[in-house]
Amino acid sequence: MLRRSHRAALYVLASQVCFFAMLAVCIPLAPRAIRHHLGVSYFGTNPTTVPPYVIGLLLTGYFLVKAAHALPQHTAPFRTLSEILLILAILVVGVCLTPYSVDAVFDWAHVTASMVLFIVELGLAIWLVAGPCRGTRAAGLLAFQVGGALIAFLSELRIVHHMLFGETLTQLAFGVLLVRCLWRMTSPLADQPMPHASG
């Protein structure tokens, strides 16, 4: 029987599947995002892609909340991770519900939520690699995440023109790192022998 702690890793995996399924639907519907070097948020402003964009991000946030609640709360690392996953869920929903094309206020709110989301994801990845999930593979995933974030940032400054690629690479590296680390962190709990019944 699957342990509750292992379900947290599967919920995070489900959140990432929902995000990338959204991209898989939106990109063919609005290829302009690639041709004109636009970011993921563009799909929230295009009438054709708004429905899958909203559904995909809301489901992403929903499964992050489920993962946060599935984590055990008896140790500090799991409590910290649970709180950060809830923050990520709130930020994802915030990005989803603030299409930048509405007006200046929505644009400011969207940019702020997006920036904080990137920062929190990067901070969580660094914490995982420096602590519970240190190792060469984890460090490599962090390097890809940082590289993708740098590409997205330089695209925002119009120095390079690969916004969608940078954002996708960042999220892919972070998602793989988070799922891998969660599974690794919860495996010792699942491997503990069940107590024998007395008498």
Image: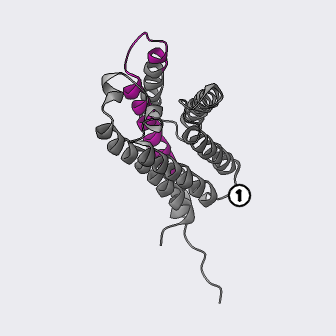
- The percent position of residue 38, horizontal first and vertical second, equals 40, 25
Residue 177 is left or right of residue 28, and the answer is right
Residue 82, visible in the rendered structure = yes
Above or below 197: residue 83: above
Residue at 66% of width from left, 28% of height from top? 105
Give the quadrant of the C terminus: bottom right
The residue that mark 1 highlights is 74
Above or below 126: residue 133: below
Residue 71 is left or right of residue 174, and the answer is right
- The percent position of residue 179, horizontal first and vertical second, equals 47, 47
In the rendered structure, which amino acid carries the disc numbered 1?
Answer: His
**Which quadrant of the structure image shows residue 104?**
top right
Residue at 55% of width from left, 54% of height from top? 62
Crowd class of label 1 (few under 14; some 14 to 19; many from 20; radius 10 Å): few
Give the magenta range.
153-182
Q: How many marks?
A: 1
Magenta stretch holds residue 148 = no
